[in-house]
């Protein structure tokens, strides 16, 4: 089969011929239909230093945000059957560690990630444990399905605590931040302030429903928040930028007794005094992965009910062969979300 | 001043002349502007047996859902000032009992209720502790303000647990149930099924945003729920009818691991086997009053943000003198919410 | 192998010869070492009407509270290996329903219960899905291990909300209620009031750490609670008796804003007015099964840390052949917990 | 009256003569009986740079941890009466801000702190709002009462989430950390690992119930935790040291999905990469003050039930005149908790 792979420890990917994976007991073979590019794929493509350090085995078929059709199932598989259209949970949990045995599989201590630790899905076929398949109802456009995975991150970040009746700031309007805006609005946030330097993303922030969109390079976010909340600050901050300035602003704009969710990974350490968090009695939630699988249920419902619309986010579609254009469109800030159409 | 009072232990009220109350330290005098009729006022008007039993002192000025202008403040009052337009929390808490000292003033053990235990607000003026005043922002229509009190009940019922992404049934579409529908939709419920026998209320249930409206006298609610949820049942039930059939249906339609909030008071005991609740691991929330005052903050935000519209609910307006027409319009099921215009 | 079975639809069990079960993929064969008698086994033995109704297939090997050694594993089993000493989760979940897919496997909609819906463990060997095995650390006495299953119910009931610094009443001091007393004390309850009519159980309630032990046939529980709490009532009630009087007393003794956990199944409906629950803003938790497997982790830790001692509860031990004596010792209220020693 | 005051912007305090405060409406005069020294008093005594910056008005009567007898009450005071023995909540909240109106008075935006923003209690008399008095039951030794204030911090830190059945590390064993050890044990923590460089404090950590006591200058805390938890890490960390190394170790020793509570204020910023918190999905709780007054209720119950013993902590007692010896005993690490005996 055709597959996109990291073949050398340097920038770039390569389109290779690879054998179709064979499924064992409890496993499933998926014929990939749509697969979308995650920010981490871009880091891998660019061979960012921290990614280079993380990546053990080469060559590796890349890609993880995936939807497709089940075409074969291994022994003992009951969760899905051949013909099901599914999206994949990309975190493969061991099922046996302390975390897995206490309903927290998303922080499994032996986690393997599709497209990094095992072969991924920018390929004609991909093999996963049956448990990692989530059936997509027909009322969700098939093209959206692979976006349900990052939308799960957005759900866990923005809904780390209830947002009904809350004022929330969303820092960073990449694809996940943009989804976060729509989720916050759909779930009752009464004020959504988005902060983002790039104009295309700011435009989309507006379209996804933000009440106020701030350009932090030109405006003083703290001042905007304080004016809009009459000095209270926001009840919640979703830090989705990974930007050190935004990270630090979160402590200033959150109201005493409020909360912050951290999703955006920072490239480097920050200098930070926790006294602000302490004196304000702030709660912080570190967010990783998606709860397996209550988060997926939430994502599915927000989409099937029409409460969240993903159309504005899919700005580019490519066949796998044009992968270089696909990655460059993101690197150049022309694209928001890029979908590979595989079959 | 003119005031509506219960003057005899029998059906009916009487318009009397009463002295304007005098405020002491920590108290506030409010010139009543709008006051609305609660279901409990109707029971008091009709002199329902349980109400007759509850009502200790006669004569008593009645009415509690109230908005108006602060016209005098007692010594030490800092919460409001003369000229503020306020709505009243109608539960007067002692501030000293175990409940009051542990952030649960809404279940104060020495609670006094406006218009029942102390003189009420269907009058030109009413006196309350300063703490019971909640300032109404100018963006909320003044006519809506007295409805914020029952809307607080709706908020505490429907948001007893997060409803974002949840499927909820609302049983009983009186004014509070109708508000509950709008709140559930605004806060991310992905399916709202309302059940109500009266046609006018069903019509309004639709208008307030219910996805499915059931007439439980003609349709099988359990069947409808099971079809709409593909056999899962609903995640949440807000029992707002006080009807024994609805009360029992709640246990059938709730999904295992889901929750039920009880607001509707029943006139009489039910026969009931708790084994259903146990085997399904259901959580039940008894709801009374409004959290003081986080619930009020939530109500205010849902209204100022435009997420909930109360206009459809105010079907009748009367001067106080026409109180008999006002009460009869509710008794005859012509009205949903009736507002007295006092000044 | 020797096995105890329900062979006719009438009182009694029979010791039969049965084939040793064969394990398939994902399954495990356990050589039973200790198995203890649950109250539901007694109902099955006595052929209580509701049990007769529930029980579909006869003959059926009975028994579910089980510990033993893994002697064979099926294909793909990673959770345990041959030689592991395990206790069994007795609820066999499907893994695919809405509840199973949202971290609530204990309320699986297709639940099968060991010894009722599939062949049980009062036998030399029993077969279960690998997931249903919980490894018992060596510091826990082997004889205690099968009691970890009912102790899971006690944990979920008494810890339905945090009990640290809380005053709790435990109604019914059967084995689970007695475990509940010890758990409440170990987890910081500052007052534990136990209510139980049988003298042997009251004696053990004292031994397990109850501060106050009430005989509800001779003392007024409500009065005792009000005196001991200076009129506040208790913060929490664990209803573990299944007795209708106790069930109703719970509403009287709980403080406004407090909570009740229901575990005890009632033989028949109660007449009940939910207004008490509503006016007091009480929360109710229906408890079934054990969370899989965070509850098991909690049970394990309470035992390995020495915080809970199960020795006083195991009053009788029998070989399987003496099963009639075993069951009669419970029926006659001579025994608290009876353990079969199988190998 | 005699009072200890900061009279110049330099190291040291001075014993002065000051007028007895006059109580207004809603206020209470307390004849101070026992008052204890807090770490922040020491910083004030030593005139630490950040304290110098914080302190606006001089002269200022210092001291805040206080117990005593109500000797006069102002108009409208219902909470206490003359003769009551009380301990003081030292945070004076405005009652009107967003936080105060939403059951979060402990993060009041206009907070004044006794002994810093208003005159304090190292004096014969002190004046506070009636609401700030908490009645001490006679079963609590009077000498302990002023320690209930810092014990409230310990409660909010260690019980930020339930500790029943949890493994917790307590970093820093000053008086609050030591109380935290006892609280964790009393509330069901199954493993308490304490870390503290000073030998006297380590000795007390043992006495207060820590299972493992580590000297972080000589032992590798991370290694100890990993050995004791078989590689899982602890479920919870209470950071009570304000030490940058301990602050950073918390992220290493906490298990994925666990939580950290931050109480210890750091003198200076730390360099820190939040990615660890994110990838581990850790929750962080900033802790300040005491919940008003549910925390006080919890403290009271833990003491009256005998679950926590404060005797080991009170190592020194002084009359107010010997204040220099008192402060030096803390500075020299000879004392744990020092109590002034005032009357």
Image (cartoon, coloured by chain):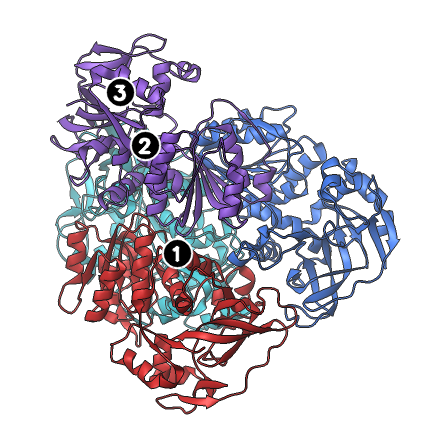
Chain colours: A cyan, B blue, C purple, D red
Chain containing mark 2: C
Residue on which disc 3 sits: C120
Residue on which disc 2 sits: C150
Q: Position of residue B73 (x, y in %)?
A: 72, 69
- In the figure, A175 relative to C343: above or below? below
Nearer to us in this view, B71 or D88: D88
Q: Are marks 2 and 1 on the same chain?
A: no
Nearer to us in this view, D18 or A301: D18
Identify the secondary structure beneath mark 3: loop
- In the figure, B307 relative to C115: above or below? below
Mark 2 or 3 closer to N-term?
3
Identify the secondary structure beneath mark 1: helix
Can you tell which mark lies on residue C4? none
**Does A337 sit left or right of C33 as displayed?**
right
- From the image, state whether disc 2 or disc 3 is nearer to you: 2
**Does C62 sit left or right of A192 as displayed?**
left
Residue on which disc 1 sits: D302
Q: Position of residue C11 (x, y in %)?
A: 35, 10
Question: Which residue is drawn at the image coordinates 75% and 63% (left, top)?
Answer: B30
**C-alpha distance separating marks 1 and 3:** 45 Å
- In the figure, B321 relative to D142: above or below? above
**Does A97 sit left or right of A150 as displayed?**
left
Q: Position of residue A15 (x, y in %)?
A: 18, 46
The quarter holding residue D271 reads bottom left
């Amino acid at each position: 089969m055709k597959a996109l792979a990291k073949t050398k420890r340097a920038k770039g990917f390569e389109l290779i011929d690879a054998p179709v994976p064979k499924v064992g007991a409890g496993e499933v073979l998926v014929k990939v239909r749509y697969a979308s590019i995650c920010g981490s794929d871009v880091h891998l493509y660019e061979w960012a230093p921290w990614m280079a350090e993380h990546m053990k085995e080469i060559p590796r078929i890349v890609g993880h945000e995936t939807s497709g059709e089940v075409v074969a199932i291994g022994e003992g598989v009951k969760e899905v059957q051949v013909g099901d259209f599914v999206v994949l949970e990309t975190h493969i949990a061991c099922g046996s560690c302390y975390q897995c045995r206490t309903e927290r599989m998303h922080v499994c201590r032996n986690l393997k990630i599709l497209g990094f630790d095992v072969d991924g899905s920018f390929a004609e076929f991909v093999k996963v444990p049956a448990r990692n398949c989530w059936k997509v109802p027909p009322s969700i456009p098939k093209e959206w399905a692979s976006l349900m995975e990052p939308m799960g991150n957005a759900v866990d970040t923005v809904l780390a605590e209830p947002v009904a009746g809350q004022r929330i700031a969303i820092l960073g309007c990449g694809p996940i931040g943009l989804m976060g805006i729509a989720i916050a609005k759909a779930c009752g946030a009464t004020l959504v302030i988005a902060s983002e330097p790039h104009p295309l993303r700011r435009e989309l922030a507006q379209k996804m429903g933000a009440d106020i969109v701030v350009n932090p390079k030109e405006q003083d976010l703290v001042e905007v928040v304080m004016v809009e909340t009459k000095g209270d600050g926001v009840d919640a901050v979703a830090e989705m930028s990974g930007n050190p300035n935004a990270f630090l602003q979160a402590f200033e704009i959150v109201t005493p007794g409020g909360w912050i969710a951290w999703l955006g990974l920072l490239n480097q350490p920050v200098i930070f005094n926790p006294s602000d968090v302490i004196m304000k009695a702030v709660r912080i939630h570190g967010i990783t992965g998606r709860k397996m699988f209550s988060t997926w249920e939430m994502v599915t419902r927000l989409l099937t009910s029409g409460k969240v619309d993903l159309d504005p986010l899919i700005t580019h579609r490519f066949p796998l062969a044009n992968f270089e254009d696909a990655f460059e469109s993101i690197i150049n800030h022309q694209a928001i979300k890029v979908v590979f159409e595989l079959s």
